[in-house]
Amino acid sequence: MATSKLSRSISLPMLILYGLGTMIGGGFYALLGEIAGEAALFTPLAFLLAGLLAFISATSFAELSSRFPFSAGEARYAEEGFSNKNFSTLVGWLVILTGIVSAAALVVATVGFLQDFISVPQTVAILFLVLTMGGIAGWGIGKSVAFVAVISVIEIGALVYIVFVAGDSLLELPSRFQDIFVPTSSTVWLGVFSGAFLGFYAFIGFEDMVNMAEEVKDVRKNLPIAILVSIFLTTVIYIVVSTIAVLTVSPEMLSASNTPVAEILRGHGAFSMTMLGIVSLLTGVNGALVQIIMASRVVYGLSKKDQAPTFLGKINSKTQTPLRATAIITFIVLVLAIFFPLQTLAESTSFIILIIFVIVNLSLWLIKGRENRDIKQKISFPRWVSLFGFITSIVVLVFQVWQKFFLNFL
């Protein structure tokens, strides 16, 4: 016998850890070297700019989550903004597609990390990882978020460990501040902006939090706070660790390394290197699990509004999770992970997410433009902030298209 209501079991601290877990993971661990290759010593500045870009769009997600605290959040935001149910359905399925493709990409990346430790056939490893994560996602939201929170603590703890072990290099910061945070030429700024555009993807994940809305305690207050706090803490962590990185290791060495975060501790023994390798493995598992949970919740939310098959909106009475939706999402992730390469999956994820950011920011701008009175809610920003978020998202999207297609023909 199925119930029709999700369990509100996620507290503010757990939600913040969940948010950190969606961002601090494979993106930073993999992208640090790439960003160092673009921004060189100004890598921390690139992360600061990327954090500001992410924060602008995060304000729109935060305000909209307070106004409309429902699953399939982005689809609801688009419907309210554009007054078009068909368009909102399309947005909802774009969000689901993002979660599925992103989860598949993270699974493939995780298998790559795993094969550095043991020799195992890729298909077997993918099958084991995906089915395990699907089982955890369907087990119960409290247990799933607790699992994500534990791994998030480990991921963050590994970065704190870097600060503890290699933090002495920060003593050089006062004398080298200009070398890291004050570019002096247009050529250098171009590298910083290129690095910031890359670094932007290390913040992707906070948007998934809005799809947990129906399982959050005091959602209109806690969800917006969790989104903004998660972005802020992630930015601080990235800046501190990347500063240590460029003060400890040359940007050239970071760029050339397959494990740039571990490179920071190369001179501190085999234990440190192995530990960071294991953490890198966990970041992939954590990120993929979060995406499976998110996608299944969006399917559930769309089903409740007759924008997806009704049977996908059924909540299992024992687990209090959308078990059918979770099973189907897990199966599709499995197929994509087996048949598509990492680069194709990762690039597709980034492109779709930027489109969603454009739509969400514009939706809030349109909603606020139609209001003739104040709406009672926990959080609100000036209307121009959402317009700025729309513009910056367009700029990033255009830059990515230009970088992908135009530069390849030069």
Image (cartoon, grey):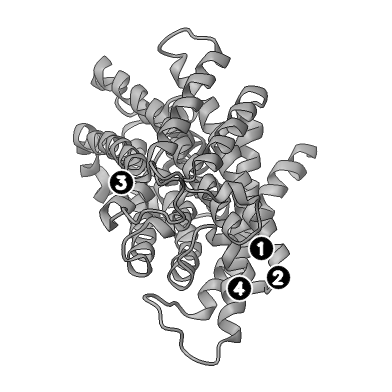
Going by the image, does 236 lie left or right of 355? left
Going by the image, does 332 lie left or right of 234? right
Q: The residue under label 3 is which amino acid type?
A: Val
Instruction: Please state the horizontal and vertical placement of residue 293, each as a whole percent of the image.
Output: 47, 43
Among numbered discs 4 and 3, the one appearing first in the sequence: 4
Does residue 6 sit above or below 23 in this rendering?
Answer: below
Does residue 254 sit above or below 349 in this rendering?
Answer: above
**Whole-number angstrom distance, CA of label 4 to CA of label 1:** 9 Å
The label number, if any, that marks residue 88 in the structure image: 1
Residue 60 in view of the camera: yes
Element type at mark 3 = helix
Q: Residue at x 60, y 73 (%)?
A: 80
The label number, if any, that marks residue 22 in the structure image: none
Instruction: Please state the horizontal and vertical placement of residue 213, each as a whole percent of the image.
Output: 43, 59
Q: Residue furthest right?
A: 409
Contact (CB < 8 A) between labels 2 and 1? Answer: yes
Among numbered discs 4 and 1, the one appearing first in the sequence: 4
Element type at mark 4 = helix
Instruction: Please state the horizontal and vertical placement of residue 404, each as a whole percent of the image.
Output: 71, 42
The label number, if any, that marks residue 84 in the structure image: 2
Residue that mark 4 sits on:
80
Q: Residue furthest front?
A: 1
Going by the image, does 322 lie left or right of 141? right
